[in-house]
Amino acid sequence: MQGRVGLRQVAAVRYAAALREGGSLPGLMEGDDLGTWVVKFRGAGQGRAALVAEVVVGELARELGLPVPEIVVVDVDPQLGRTEPDQEVQDLLRASAGANLGSDYLPGSITYDPLAFLVAPELAARVLWLDALTLNVDRSWRNPNLLVWGGGLWLIDHGAALYPHHDWASADRAIARSLPGVDDHVLLTAVAARPEAFAQADAELAERVEEALLTAVLERVPDDWLAVPPQRYVQWLLARVAARGAWRDAVIAALGSVDEAGRAAKPEDAGRSERSEQSGRSGRSGRPDWLRAGDWLRTGGARPRQPGGRGDA
Ligand SMILES: Nc1ncnc2c1ncn2[C@@H]1O[C@H](COP(=O)(O)OP(=O)(O)O)[C@@H](O)[C@H]1O
Ligand SMILES: [Mg+2]
């Protein structure tokens, strides 16, 4: 575990561009640390709970050895919006004074394409396990929220995870809930190449998700984002770990159905293959010719180095 309490604090100095592909209106901002940050705003429609999920799941992933761009708190002065021509951005900045969420911008990264890149089953299994634990419903074929950068896979966008926290009164009914949409998880077929990898990930990771680790992760969340005491999250996640038999078996069943189908292309894959061929890929898998069986991305296990030249304070 890293020896830190809060996240690093950065002051925004300029709004550089909107990232229009995101549903949460993220923007690129320059920081006073000379960094470029993908900022999610406290004043955006999703609200602060989505920012809490970003920190809790992103930092938990990092503690479990998964590659996540550095997360910081970006302080926004609403005056920055004054020179912004776009009314929507002006309004967003005005509504977002104070602590916002920043993710280290990975320049030149591309969205993970399961037909173009092979991910080692061990790494895929750990990501799938984390998503099942945290009920992250946002890692689908259509919307992978995984980037490929520097030869490795990076996890982004955990704002939709922990969704029961939008209604704490009913959150305990979700303690044993299976991951909705697991059949459509973008890494399911990668794990199915070696389904035992999921049981291994479960055995290894479950014992690491302890009270002390979760408490340390919750300490990184800015106080004024939290609608409940941080211990509520800690206890809820511990209860999910304790009840994991149910949601784990649902993932194992989903992995089994991939095997039985022989990983045959689903009807909707046809369009994808066509697109892949247009982009210079060949074969039924749509993998590029240069990608041979041994060229798997192997970023699992070791703690990834942080991008950019900034220190990980
Ligand atoms: N750290 C990052 N580095 C580079 N690009 C990023 C990063 N974070 C997000 N993006 C890009 O911005 C898009 C939207 O960000 P995301 O976190 O997925 O927000 P949303 O909640 O709006 O989907 C991503 O699909 C990706 O293309
Ligand atoms: Mg996204």
Image (cartoon, rainbow, N blue to C red):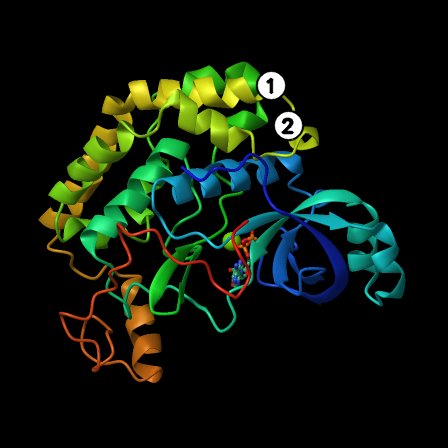
Picture quadrant of residue 271:
bottom left
Asked whether 244 or 122 is in front, the reply is 122
Q: Quadrant of the N terminus?
A: top left
Amino acid type shown at disc 1 = Pro
- From the viewer's perspective, is 160 left or right of 149? right
Left or right: 134 as drawn, with respect to 16: left
Q: Nearer the viewer, residue 179 or 154?
A: 154
Label at residue 226:
2
**Residue at disc 2, secondary structure:** loop
Would you say the residues marked 1 and 2 are in contact, meaning their CB atoms lie under 8 Å apart? yes
Mark 1 beta carbon near ligand 1 (under 8 Å): no
In front here: 72 or 273?
72
The kind of secondary structure element at disc 1 is loop
- Give the answer, above or below, for where 9 lies relative to 235: below
In the image, residue 190 above or below residue 170:
below
Where residue 185 appears, as percent x and y from the top left, is 32, 48
Q: Residue 155 at x, y = what percent?
A: 42, 53
**Residue 36, label in figure:** none
Q: CA distance from mark 1 to mark 2?
A: 7 Å
Q: Position of residue 181 (x, y in %)?
A: 35, 41
Residue 79 visible to an observer of this rendering: yes
Side (left or right) of 189 relative to 312: left
Q: Is residue 115 left or right of residue 235?
A: left
Name the mark on residue 229. Answer: 1
